[in-house]
Image: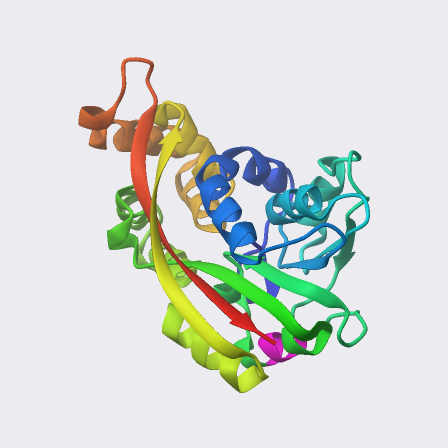
Amino acid sequence: MSDASAGFHLTGNAPERYERYVAPIMAPFVTALVDSAGLAPGDSVLDLACGTGFTARLAAARVGPTGRVHGADVNAAMLTVALAHRPHLYPDIEFTEAPAEHLPYDDDLFDAVLCQQGVQFFPDLATALGEAARVTRPGGRFAATTWTHPDRSPYFTAQHEAVDRYAGPDAATDFTAAFRCTGDVVAEALHKAGFHDATSRVLTLDVTLPPLAGFAAGHLSALPWGRRIAEAHGEQALKETGRVLAARFADRTSPDGTVTLPFTATLTTATR
């Protein structure tokens, strides 16, 4: 997930922290996303707004050595981390710096285009999905996940409150951009772009997180609105935020310190 032109832009060592701290939350939804595309050995796949490559790596494992996987993202720093974590047991994933609105691929190239938590950050959703349609072969699949309202995910609700408290309402508004794109919005845009049979379904999946005092602080440090906390009050404020979130979910904390919480996203699929 990344689109710098819409405000989700990571620099410095934030992309590496994104790879580390966002992975546990994303993992089950990445699996659901890739499963929904019905990938087969030999398929060609585009991971759109690929970030550090969560979806691309799983897609490569599914399509095998005869398949092809590409990842496109506008954020060069995220792609540097994606390249560093690229597996070599499968065909090399080709990562390319490119915005979703101007993809450097031929028409009808991909059997599937996948987008994990990226469409909500596209400055021009219609143009981006038009490009996705252009590079998808007839009969090919598109699938995307978007977070539902943060009220459906207790961790995100608590995180939003922390951002508002420590970084102010402007940063809290930036946070809500990650939740602004509903399944209906995506499905309508897909139909207008030339896809058909667009459907959405809500997924609520339990995710087990590491001890929250450290994890929540690290997770925020990997996100633009979390960096606003550090800029306003210093790194110590991130640590304090982590302790606040840990206390918030103390009643759900296991003896080993891990916390299992529900997260809710919408999975939208369509056919070209």
Res 186 visible:
no
Q: Position of residue 212 (x, y in %)?
A: 35, 27
- Which image quadrant: the N terminus? bottom right
Nearest the viewer among 103 and 161 is 103
Please tell me which residue is depicted at 60% across the width and 44% down the height of the picture.
54
* Residue 184 shown left or right of residue 138 in the figure: left
Say if 41 sits above or below 261 in the image. Answer: below
Res 253 visible:
yes
- Which image quadrant: the C terminus? bottom right
- Numbered marks: total: 0
Question: Which residue occupies the extreme left position in the image?
Answer: 251
Residue bounds of the magenta highlight: 127-131
Please tell me which residue is depicted at 53% across the width and 60% down the height of the picture.
118
Please tell me which residue is depicted at 29% across the width and 50% down the height of the picture.
164
Say if 239 sits above or below 91 in the image. Answer: above
Q: Position of residue 257 (x, y in %)?
A: 32, 18
Q: Quadrant of residue 220 in the image? A: top left
* Residue 232 shown left or right of residue 156 in the figure: right
Q: What is the basis of the colouring in this image? A: rainbow
Magenta region includes residue 80: no
Magenta region includes residue 129: yes
Q: Position of residue 263 (x, y in %)?
A: 34, 45
Nearest the viewer among 62 and 147 is 62
Q: Position of residue 5 (x, y in %)?
A: 60, 66
